[in-house]
Image (cartoon, rainbow, N blue to C red):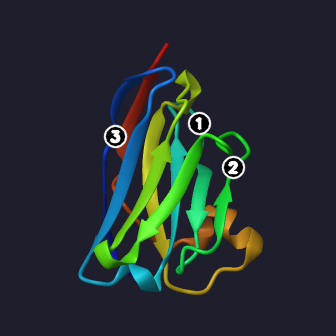
Amino acid sequence: QVQLVESGGGLVQAGGSLRLSCTTSGRSFSSFAGGWFRQAPGKEREFVAAISRSGGGTFYADSVKGRFTISRDNAKNTVYLQMDGLKPEDTAVYYCAAELAPLIGTYYYREDSFGSWGQGTQVTVSS
């Protein structure tokens, strides 16, 4: 559907912050719902946050609620994930996802709702 490129990962101490960015090439991101998922070593990929096409709807996993903020700038074809108060358990590869079809409610939380995926960016939080 669309090519996605993540950036902004890295190594940070516990309590620190990082901002991930996800940009598209070739198509306007404004037509797509956006999401962030993560996969820690030895674990399955899990939902982190998602945002509607307009940005008016945002959705979060309980484990990141109050610490992470998803946002988008459609003029820049970019979706962001601001991560504050990072914990060692947030260590994972973070993947950006996008979906052209309209999503409703709980479908935002589902990995199989998203048809386009980035390559992932590593986030490591040291204790």
- In the rendered view, does 69 fall on the left or right side of 79? right
Label 3 sits on residue: 9
- Provide the residue designation for mark 1: 43
User: Which residue is depicted at the point 61% across and 86% down?
Assistant: 102
Q: Nearer the viewer, mark 1 or mark 3?
A: 3
The x, y position of residue 63, in whole percent, is 69, 39
Position above or below: 9 against 109: above
Camera-nearest label, 1 or 2? 2
Relative side of 87 to 124, left or right = right
Helix, strand or loop under label 1: loop
- Identify the element where label 2 is drawn: loop
The mark found on residue 61 in the picture is 2
Looking at the rendered image, the quarter that the N terminus falls into is: bottom left
In the figure, residue 42 lies in which quadrant? top right
Q: Amino acid at mark 2?
A: Ala
State how far apart marks 3 and 2 are (Cα).
Answer: 19 Å
Q: Secondary structure at mark 3?
A: loop
Residue at left 55%, top 73%?
55
